[in-house]
Amino acid sequence: MKVLVTGSQGYIGTVLTPLLKAQGHEVTGLDVDLYEQCTFGTDMPDIPFIHKDVRDIALDDLQGYDAVIHLAALSNDPLGFLNPELTLDINYRASAKLAELSKAAGVKRFVFSSSCSNYGAGGEDFLTEESPFNPVTPYGESKVLAEKAISALADDSFSPIFLRNATAYGVSPRLRFDLVLNNLVAWAFTTGLVYLKSDGTPWRPIVHVEDISRAFGAVLQTPRSAIHNQAFNVGVNSDNHRIKDIALIVSDTVPGCRIKIASNASPDKRCYRVDCSKIQRIIPEFKPQWDTRKGAYELFRAYRKHGLKLEDFEGPRFQRIGHIRKMLERKKLNDQLRWQTCKITDRSQESTQSVPTT
């Protein structure tokens, strides 16, 4: 297939695009590259990408593709709360517009990167794809609205699929430290403390970034009739954990560390565990290969190899919200998170031009 991946330069995209290429797909990325200065310890994948804001995608950008995988978003809760209306604009409205344009361009398969954050305050019971939504953050709300808008476009010629990813973890060239396992291993490695900012009681499903990528790759290989206009929880049932149990795994992994709960810790409203049996049943090509302990050790080895320091992951170098605030303070981004001067690069056409943002 000829595949366009939005968000190709992000945490998932930099793992997914090489996987798709290895599967034989012709892959092009599209990304505004807000985190171009945040590469962690390894080279970026050699995949052609169009340097463009997802809000600015035009019909011509989508011509000739068999499938679009839509990852691009403001993808964590602190960024969502920074400007909730902007989160809706990017994650919901721009996503719905992208799907409409993809359909108009003749794209047959549209794979949307959704989230188990849709379930939000989901309680103690296992949640299936038919469970009610209960988002508690602007990020979760934006994903719910986007799913509904995109689903309404489904017909005989346009097939949307929704992958509701569990909370990701694992090493990536654009590593995120706001994710629970990545964060706890980083605290343990740099300070000797597995530092919990909540009381540790909420449930959270987690899944390795490589396994998320395998799910997207598997969707492209699955017959349309099996997956058309359906949602799938992405993860494995055994990797639903209470946060305090993830902390215990980390304390077993990183030598010489201990668990510390913040003095002002309180229960997190986000509490959900999800049933991921549907994706295993409907998409047998999806074969996850990671679990939490294996992932914690991978992260520990990567942090040790690259000499991670506390100021790196808690500061603007790798912390998403810290990096964006720094770019805003330096006037490199405006309040709509658009580059003040933006280098537009289309590597697929080997052309570069600099233009002002609007």
Image: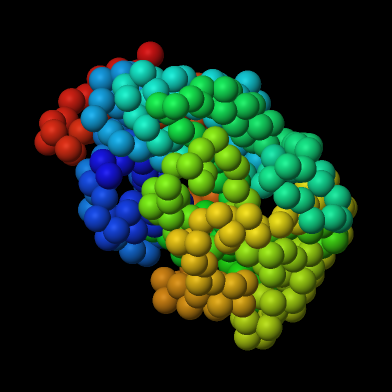
Residue drawn at the location 39% of the way across and 48% of the way down: 220
The answer to whether residue 210 is visible is: yes
Please state if 180 lies on the left or on the right of 219 as rendered. right
Is the residue 323 above or below the residue 238 in the image?
A: above
Residue drawn at the location 65% of the way across and 58% of the way down: 276
Q: Nearer the viewer, residue 296 or 306?
A: 296
Please state if 260 lies on the left or on the right of 290 as rendered. right
Q: Nearer the viewer, residue 241 or 194?
A: 241
Q: How many numbered callouts?
A: 0
Residue 285 place in picture, x, y as percent: 45, 61
Residue drawn at the location 52% of the way across and 67% of the way down: 288
Is the residue 146 above or below the residue 13 in the image?
A: above
Q: Quadrant of the C terminus?
A: top left
Q: Residue furthest left?
A: 350
Residue 171 place in picture, x, y as percent: 46, 64
Q: Residue furthest top?
A: 358
Q: Classify residue 34 by image quadrant.
A: top left
Q: Nearer the viewer, residue 331 or 29?
A: 29
Q: Quadrant of the N terminus?
A: top left
The answer to whether residue 29 is visible is: no
Is the residue 247 above or below the residue 328 in the image?
A: below
Residue 28 place in picture, x, y as percent: 27, 41
Q: Classify residue 163 by image quadrant.
A: top right
Residue drawn at the location 33% of the way across and 63% of the way down: 42
